[in-house]
Amino acid sequence: MSDSTQGQAMWGGRFTKGPDELVQAFNASVRFDQRLAMHDIAGSIAHVHMLFAQGILQKEEVQAIEDGLNKVRQEIEEGIFVWQESLEDVHMNIEHRLTELIGAVGGKLHTGRSRNDQVALDMHLYVRDELHDVEHLVTQLMQVIITVSQDNIDVIIPGYTHLQRAQPVLLSHHLLAYFWMLERDQKRIRDALKRVDRMPLGAGALAGTTFAIDRELVMRELSFTALYENSMDAVSDRDYLVETLAILSMIMMHLSRLSEEFILWTTTEFGFIELDDAFTTGSSIMPQKKNPDMAELIRGKTGRVYGHLMGLLTTVKGLPLAYNKDLQEDKEGLFDALDTVKPALMLYKAMIETMTIRRDVIQEQVRADFSAATDLADYLAIKGMPFRQAHEIVGRIVRHCIDQNIPFTEVSIETLQQYSPLFEKDVLPRLLPESVVAMRSCRGGTAPSAVIQQLGLAKALLQE
Ligand code: ARG
């Protein structure tokens, strides 16, 4: 039998010839949807169990089909299964092999089912597992952020707005901002899982089935808690995949922002951190180079994940009910997005765990600027001067220091008093970054006391 007549065997009844080679190659999805194989088999086994319970298939038939499917599973796991493009997709490849193994009874597997509800079921099962994996990886990264924040609670770095020095902050405070981004991602995943938790099988091609099936039985066997209540919605809903891609995009957005920080922080100009050699790469021409390629790639790959989100939204937007072959295009982008986000999360966990925080460089940097300016103005305001006027005076002091080429930490009390008699000796310690940080002790602020409280909340959340 030629490849294409084999392919024809699955739906070839009304055709006089097999598909053109171009059609076969363009139509086939098995190259990428074979990754659904384990979920496809699990769905099929639940389906035949139900067909038996409903008296639609005999015990021996179901036994033969289940044994056959287990054999197919084993062949796939051992890598000896022969995938054939002529058989179009994962579903027909598995069914074809099943029938080779157990004979014509294999053809009973598809009773009361269509590939349209079958592929919907496979994707729900697959995405449920994948979202749990992603959630776990997000949690691991959150855990590492907590550990590093706790171990380095005393490190003060410059805080920035407009990428200009603004006010000093605890490094822990800065890193924990990413903890909260990831915590929202984690919540989004848990919420999306509620909508993934709908069992589509029984929708048939679009209208339901004439067989007396029990959809709730399949639902329970596959650990779903809800059913699609409309067969047409069941086979054409891709909302849960759009949502998944939106969540993956958001995770990448967060990692991309972190990447931008790490790329800056590893420069000679910043020098706040050094990444472990194992997570950097060198240059083929410049021997001194140590490049943060993983951070750059994660920043770069963010665009590709966004692209998959836009791609799916666009694919689905013009589709009439119910199933259209366009929907086969839901897979590659999603798979690629998952294949991008999962290693990105693992890499960040490893990079943060192994990075060196260059305390000496940071210490020097954080003292060499005017980040205490707001505090100096606040000091005058507390003594009764209108804040606007205080702002103006401190601005002139900054100007003076720039002209003299000295940082705030070196300015004398006499100099300050030339600008305002309200300055007294007690102002000098307030110019130190430790003091600037410690003064911001409101809830959510960067004072060590507030950050320790924040850390406590973060830890409690992970323990949940
Ligand atoms: N490979 C197809 C997909 O991924 C499976 C469903 C095909 N259904 C059909 N009527 N051709 O969407």
Image: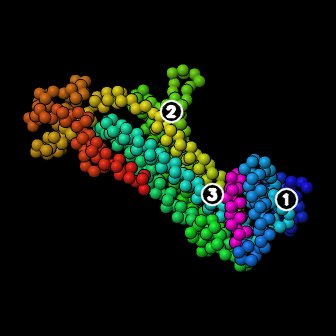
Q: Amino acid at mark 2?
A: Pro
Mark 2 crowdedness (10 Å alpha carbons): few <14, some 14-19, many ≥20: many
Q: Quadrant of the C terminus?
A: bottom left
* Residue marked by disc 1: 100
From what the image shows, is residue 114 above or below residue 410? below
* Residue marked by disc 3: 126
Beta carbon at label 1 within 8 Å of ligand 1: no
- What percent of the width, then of the height, locates residue 180? 40, 50
Q: Secondary structure at mark 2?
A: loop
* Residue 29 lies in the magenta-colored region: yes
Residue 308 seen in the figure: yes
* Residue marked by disc 2: 292
- What percent of the width, then of the height, locates residue 282? 55, 26
Residue range (magenta) = 25-50
Q: Secondary structure at mark 3?
A: helix
Residue depth check, mark 3 versus mark 1: number of the one nearer the observer: 1
Q: Amino acid at mark 1?
A: Glu
- Residue shown at the point (39%, 29%) measured from the top left: 358
